[in-house]
Amino acid sequence: MKKIIIIGGLSAGPSAAAKARRENEQAEILLFEKGANISYATCGMPYAFSGVIESRDNLMVVKPELLQNRFNIDVHLNEEIIKIDTQNKTVYSQTKSYTYDTLIFATGAKSIVPPIGNIKLANNWSTCRSMIDYDKITKEGLASTSKHITVIGAGLIGVEVAENLKEAGKEVTLIEGDSHVLNMWQQKFGIFAGNVLASKGIEVLTLSFVSKFDIDKNGKINAVVTQAGKSIPTDFVILSVGIKPNTDLLLAEGAEAIDNGALKVNELMETSIKDVYAAGDNVSIKNLQTNEYDYFPLGTHSNKAGRAAGANAVGRTIEFKGAYKTAIVKVFDYTLARTGMNARALTQKGIPFKTVLTVAGSTPGYYPGQKDLITEIYYSPETEQILGAELFGEVGVDKRVDVLSTAIYAKLKITDLAQLDLAYAPPFSPAKDPVVVTSFVAENIINNRSEQISVEDLELLMKDNNLNEGYLLVDSRTAEEYGKGTIPGAVNYPLDELRQSVDFIKSLDKKVIVFCQKGLRGYLAELILRNNGVTHIANVAGGFKVWQMYSDRIEIPEPILVKK
C-alpha cells in the first residue's frame, strides 16, 4: 500500500489529498498542518472585514472532518513538520517521525515583515495571511476604538484590505513604495486605480517608505513615520508588502529553486528530489510565454497544481503546464485586470511589441447605464500574436480579460479577435464588443490607415516642450466640449468643420496630433486629414478621457496656441 505524506493544509495540500484519494482508494494519505485550520480562504479575508463575507465560518472552505470522513485522509492539525530526510524518506515533527513513499510539499508562503523601526516592540499591527492574522485584525483593527488604520503595501491584498476597511467605516491610509498602486500593472492603470481609491476618501501615498513606528511605553503604535518625515497618526497597522515561499526544509535537502526560494517543479509538479512533489505558493512554475521559471502566487494555480501533484503522487499522469500572470482586482465600483506580458515586462525581456488602446462601451449606448471599458493590448509587430493586455472599467472587465487570456493561450493574432463569435445581447455587450473594437483599431494601425500615440508619449513631448516646435495638437471635439477643458496646447478644430481648415493645417508644415473624447472622432479627424494630404498624423489613444485620468500629476510648460 502506497504511503503519501502531504505537508501543508491551506490550498494545494487539501486539493492534492482529495485528488490522490479519488485516484487511489487504497493509498495511505497523511496531511500535516502546523495550525488549527485547513483550507481557509485567505483571498476572502478582506471582504470579511467589511461584512461582504458575513462570518468567519464562511472563510472555512473545507473542514478537517470532511477530509477525514469523506476522503479517508489522516489529518494532523497543530503538528508542524520541522525536518525532512529525503534520503531515508522520513519527515519529523517535534514528537514523532513518519516515513513516506511519496511526499507532497505544499507549505505555501509567509508574509514579509520589513525592518521597520520599533516593529519588534510594537503590538497593534498584523500581516494579513492566516486565520491568526484575521482574528487579530477583527479584534483590534476593527474595534470601535480603532478609528484609523494604515495599510502598508498596495498590491492586490493591500488594495482589497484598504477598500474593505473603508467600507467598514475606518479612515484609511495606503502606503506604497512604487510610483503607483498595483504595480503588476502599467503605471497609467495603477494611476486609474489610485484615483478611484482617493475619490473614496482613502489617503494614498506613493513613492513612500515607512522608516519607523512611533510607539508609547506599552508598545502601542501611535503614528507611522515615512522616510520623508511624514507622520501619520494611526490606531492599527496592516502589513501587505509581499510574501516569501516556505521552502527552507527542502532547500536544506538540496532542492532546486529560483532566487526567491520558490521550488522549481516540472509539469508533473515534481521537484528536483526524487519522489518529492510540490505545489502552491512555495513553487515556481513555467511562464508559458517566456518558457522560464516564474512565480505565480494565486489560489487558482495552487488548486490546479495541488490536484496534479495528488494524482501524480499515486501514479497517474496529470500535467499543469504553467501560467502567464492573469490577475483581476476590485477597486470599489471599478475592476482592474491583466493577462500576459505588459509593456514593462516586454521591454525588460527585449521583446518587440506594439500597443493598441481603445475606450469602448461595455454595453450599447441605448441600453441604460452604459459604462466605458479601457482596453490596452500588446502584440508582436512581426507575427501580430497577442502578448498581453490590461483593462479598466466598471462593467464586463472579467469577461473580456478571460477572452484575452484564452486568446494568449491559443496564440491568436490580434487581428483574429475581430473574427471571434462573442455573445451579444444589449444587457451584456454592444454589437461590436470592446475586444472586437480593439481588433478593428489594430487592423487599421497594421494596415497603415491609422497611428496612435499613447498618453505616456504625449506627456514626454509636452515635458520636452516639443509641442511648441514641431507639433500641432488638434482637439476635434465640439467647441462646447473644448471650453470645458482640453489638453494644454490643443487647438479646437471641431470634426464637423475640420475640412474647412485642412489647407491652413497643411500650410503649418507640422506633425499633427489629434484627439477627441475617447478616440472615435479623433480617428475620423485623422482620416480626413490623411486623405487630404496631411501625412504625419497620430490619434491620442483613449482621447481626452484617458489623458485626463492619467495626467493630473503632470507639470508641463505653457503651450503656444496656433489657430486660424
Image (spheres, rainbow, N blue to C red):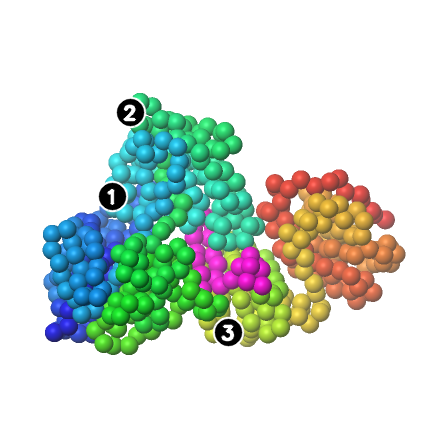
Residue at image coords 25%, 53%: 40
Does label 3 or label 2 sit earlier along the sequence? 2
Q: Are marks 3 and 2 in contact (CB under 8 Å)?
A: no
Q: Amino acid at mark 3?
A: Lys
Q: Are marks 2 and 1 in contact (CB under 8 Å)?
A: no
* Visible residue check, residue 34: yes
Q: Amino acid at mark 1?
A: Ile
* Residue 115 location, quadrant: top left
Q: Amino acid at mark 2?
A: Asn
Q: Secondary structure at mark 1?
A: helix
Most foreground residue, 191 or 502? 191
Q: Is residue 324 magenta?
A: yes
* Residue 284 location, quadrant: bottom left
Most foreground residue, 243 or 460? 243
* Residue that badge 3 annotates: 411
Q: Is residue 404 magenta?
A: no
Please identify the residue farthest to the top as the structure is shown.
217
Residue 244 locus on image (x, y percent): 36, 51
Q: Say above or below: 246 vs 443.
A: above
Most foreground residue, 204 or 106? 106
Residue 347 locus on image (x, y percent): 58, 60
Q: CA distance from mark 2 to mark 1?
A: 22 Å
Q: Which residues are magenta?
A: 323-350
* Visible residue check, residue 17: no
Which labelled disc corresponds to residue 132?
1
Does label 3 or label 1 sit earlier along the sequence? 1
The N terminus: image quadrant: bottom left
> Which class describes the residues within 10 Å of circle 2: few (<14), some (14-19), or many (20+)?
few
* Residue that badge 2 annotates: 218
